[in-house]
Amino acid sequence: MDVVYVREWEKQDQVRSYVLPTSYVCSWSCRNVLAFAGPVQGPWSDASLVRPIHVVDPDRPWDVHSLCTQHGEDIVALEWDPSGTQLLSAGRFGEVKLWSMKDYLVNDWHLVTSVDLDGEEIVTLQWLHVGGRLTLNNMNMNSTVFNEKITHQSYAPSLSEFGGKACNGWVAVTATGMVYITALSKDGMPTTVSECLGNVRSRVVVADAAFTVKGFVIIALSDGNSMSPVKFYKLKLSNVNEKCTMHIEPLPSFFLRCAVDPNKKEKYTNVTHVKFEHREGVEQVVVVVSGTNSSTIEVWGLRNEPVTLHKIFQPQAPAGKQPMAVKWGSLTTIADRPLVTALAVPKLPVQSSNLVESKGYDTKFFNGSALAIAFQDGNIHLVQRLTLHTLAMFSLDSWQRGLDETSAKRQRLSAFRFLSCCELSGTCCGLMGVDPGGRLYVFRLTPSLTQNVDPVLPIRHVVSLLEYCMLSGWDCWDVLLVVGPGMVESVIDKLTDNYCQQNPALQQIHLTRFVAIKAALYRLTNNGGGKSADCYAKLLLNAISSSLKALLRPTQLGSQDRGPSEKLAVLCSKSTETDLDKVMINLETKEFVIEPATLQSLQQLIQWVGDFTLYLLSLLPTQQGMPNRVGSTLLRDAQFLQMLRELLVMVRIWGLIKSSCLPVFTATSDNLDSLQLLFKLLTKAWMCAKEERLSIDWDDSLVDECCLLPSRMMVPNLDSPPPAEGIMARPQSKQPILVQVGNAPGQTTSLMMSYPSSDPMWRSGGEHLSHDIVRRVHLGVSPAEDVKQCSRCSSTSLLKSFAKTSAQKAWDQRWARQCLCGGQWRKVTEDDD
């Protein structure tokens, strides 16, 4: 475990005194966006912000968006929804607000709705389960089949609408023993119902909620007294006549071991944490009990125990079947530890056998099987969730003592050497925490935590996590934290081998995510900029190809023959004809007829296809012995070159319908047929690439003609990309990066080498000229309209869509949620200029 970076609030030349905050809350979404909030007084004190929520992209921690919540009291809970686009915030006395990203912008939020829980003090807040989950099977880690390694489990939603559709909402438990269920209607209007847990209302200090496979909600709670039992309740929710109802049933409870031990019951008096070990697992629960100067941690689990019947009832019992009862039993206890200040449970669903669970630390794989515990002495322990065996440890106290700080600052921070809250990332490869001084910490957690292990084991674990992100749609930024430069090639080779062994239908479904992950991996190396650019070019061309082919319709709707796009693919895969017009003769051009207005609206995409083909062919003579250059992997990909050939044929046909939609080239001769020349050279390159040899011997005539291309046609002069700014673009180091709000760390020369200056495919242009990466149009030096920027690759795009045709609207909507590289969109404000 090591620190990736630490984010401060104050400027270097300004040290302010303030009242010590008492508590913070934080949350880490599946899209790798961090959110945290604290009391009113703190280093960010601003009269215009009332109890703000701070939203941070972990790749750009210096760029913080503070959301003014207007909560009447301190914020005590933050919860991301499963999609990572909505955030729940709860004030101390019953005010719950739902926030949503506006147009999927990480720094632009709006209030969806607000609910008042009758002034009740909120203890815990959770989103209702929406059904279904993907589980990583720890026992099939060596399998190459996705369906064996990552299985889909049918979870019933906590609350269903008509037809079994999941209903969005949340559950809240208050300090007086009340439980509130809030359901959201289709138009976003909330409906809240409440019931009392138990026969009478009682005091609740700590609580947690989890969900079962049948859709029940399980509540665990304690009144804070170690002598009292930890109680459990089962909630069954139903929707009757569009009204939510709930049935509450008490479950078996247990008394803590420290409460029955005469030597400990006076020492440990306060229950400070009660947590289920997973949101979707109710079999184990972790309880932390603290005293004046120390804490004890107990892990309890459900187990079936035989029930001994009285001899009167034994003759009536079925032969060979002994009655069983579900009871709580103590699994592990550790005592005499420093005071526990924060506890984080894993989010990754992991399926393991009982043997692996009982000796989980022996598997060398902690993801989904470990807890993060922060102590008041500044130590952070990563422990196995059942045995509480320590897997890794980090000391904030030792690290902060080594900082080169002024004596005044060191004295002020001396009381902040512990985390007041912490949370694990989705794949458990990262840990975020906030200390009482408002510092944000992000830790890197390597999946293989034990020394002297099989060198193949870390690669296998990382590949499994990347595959899980691929299938689940989670962002893989936290997994990339643990991939060192020396592991990149091995991880990519293993990931590619596993992907190629899946059936073609599954490959097609996950192609976009697979290529995006490969591109992100290549960006981690100093010489991987060319291959990364090739991956993004492949992503864009696949998207353009699928969008253009989706416009084609067969002439007869009831025809059982292949569609026009399938006929074109079959023809281009078999034909070696270099004459574009002769290829068109073998097609039914009537099936390629499209509205002229639609073709004209897509001219920028068609222009990019033509420019990219010209640029790629011009690079062919320089590819010998240069495997890392831009275009090297694409020129060896026969399937990619065939896709380009298909697009050129379609463009040629559409030029007969609307000549203005054709790509425009600057040629030295008026009689030169540019499309015909590009198709001929592309066909020759495709014929060489499809031989599937390790080293391609390009035909001499092809090389000569490609060398003459710049003298016959003007190759587009594409701008160099801006330098990378994110944390992932920087070389990995054991020394953490200390960053400050609004002050991005300076760039280094090695960062520029990650992206070659000739990279034309995916970046947004040079320093002075903005370019819309989605619509492929120039925006000028100072765009007149509002723009958005990718938080990972710094590409820009227009914030508002001006599309008029349905095809153009569909293309804009494809990239509304995230950038081509998979990064988050952020609105460019005046402060960014």
Image: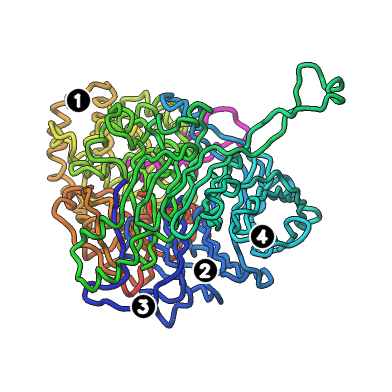
Report the side of 745 relative to 394 (left or right).
left
What residue lies at 45% left-to-right and 34% top-to-bottom?
A: 508
Q: Which residue, given by chain and number where applicable, does mark 2 sit on?
A: 75
Q: Residue furthest bottom?
A: 47
The tag earlier along the polypeptide, 4 or 3, is: 3
Q: Which mark is residue 18?
A: 3
Determine the secondary structure under disc 2: strand
Q: What residue does disc 1 label?
A: 696
Packing grade of label 4 (10 A; few <14, some 14-19, many >=20) is some
In the image, which residues are magenta?
538-565
Marks 1 and 2, Cα distance to the nearest angstrom?
A: 62 Å
Nearest the camera: 705 or 808? 808
Report, in whole angstroms, how far the alpha carbon at label 1 lies from the one at label 3: 67 Å
Report which quarter residue 96 is drawn in: bottom right
Which quadrant is home to the N terminus? top left
**Mark 1 belongs to which amino acid?**
Ile
Quarter residue 180 falls in: bottom right
Q: Position of residue 354 (x, y in %)?
A: 53, 28
